[in-house]
Image (spheres, helix red, strand yellow):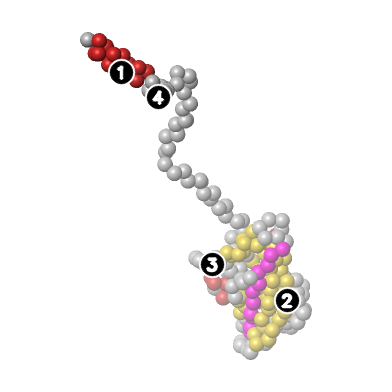
Amino acid sequence: MRGFLMAFGLALGLAGCGGPSTPGPSSGPASIAPSAAPSAGPSHPAVPTAKPVAVCFATQLAAKVTGWQGATGHRIATVTLTNTGARTCTVQGTPEVELLDAHGNILIDSQTGGPNGLPHVTKGAPAFHLAQGASVKTLVQDDNYCRAAPALPTTIAFVLPANAGRLVAAAGPGGSVPPCLGSPASLGSISMNGWTK
């Protein structure tokens, strides 16, 4: 019996000599990582809708004939159109084109050639957005002027599509009329190439 008690005491002593126990959970306030808010899926920023650029009115533009060339039976004017307004505007489509004498009288008018000679914008016509001071240019050709000799120099006028007004180009050097190659009663013809930068 005595041996048994000694063995029991020895076992208790060894148990008391064991290493420190692992500390339990802290009873202080816990540090909890904030939970992420539920996600509604990837967010996509709203794409701003581009506002259309307003049409250029004749009052916002200046035109100038920068030169004339002669071709067989034709006269060809190079004309520059410049935005003189404070805001960007758009030039698009084909205007009615007029050849004027030095007093502003109409010598040849594209409208006599039918609907294509009237101001119009065809589907897919390029639109040129002109900032202040920016320009486009075109070539205007006329032929078969068969009436009385006009006051020179001649120049070009445009009646713009979309009721944007009429614009007379400042005359350039060499403006004259094409030769008469048809009937004396001919009204002549005038047309322009598209606008280019």
Badge 1 is on which residue? 11
- Mark 1 vs mark 4: give the one in front: 1
Q: Amino acid at mark 3?
A: Ala
Badge 3 is on which residue? 125
Instruction: Name the residue: 69% across, 84% down.
Output: 69
Badge 4 is on which residue? 19
Q: Is residue 18 left or right of residue 89?
A: left
* 96 versus 6 height, above or below: below
Foreground: 133 or 69?
133
Q: Are marks 2 and 1 in contact (CB under 8 Å)?
A: no
**Where is residue 12 drawn, in percent x and y?**
32, 16
- Mark 3 vs mark 4: give the one in front: 4
The mark nearer the N terminus, 2 or 1, is 1
Instruction: Name the residue: 53% across, 70% down.
Output: 115
Please check the rendered image and state whether residue 148 is part of the magenta-colored stretch, yes or no.
Answer: no
Badge 2 is on which residue? 66
Instruction: Name the residue: 62% across, 58% down.
Output: 55
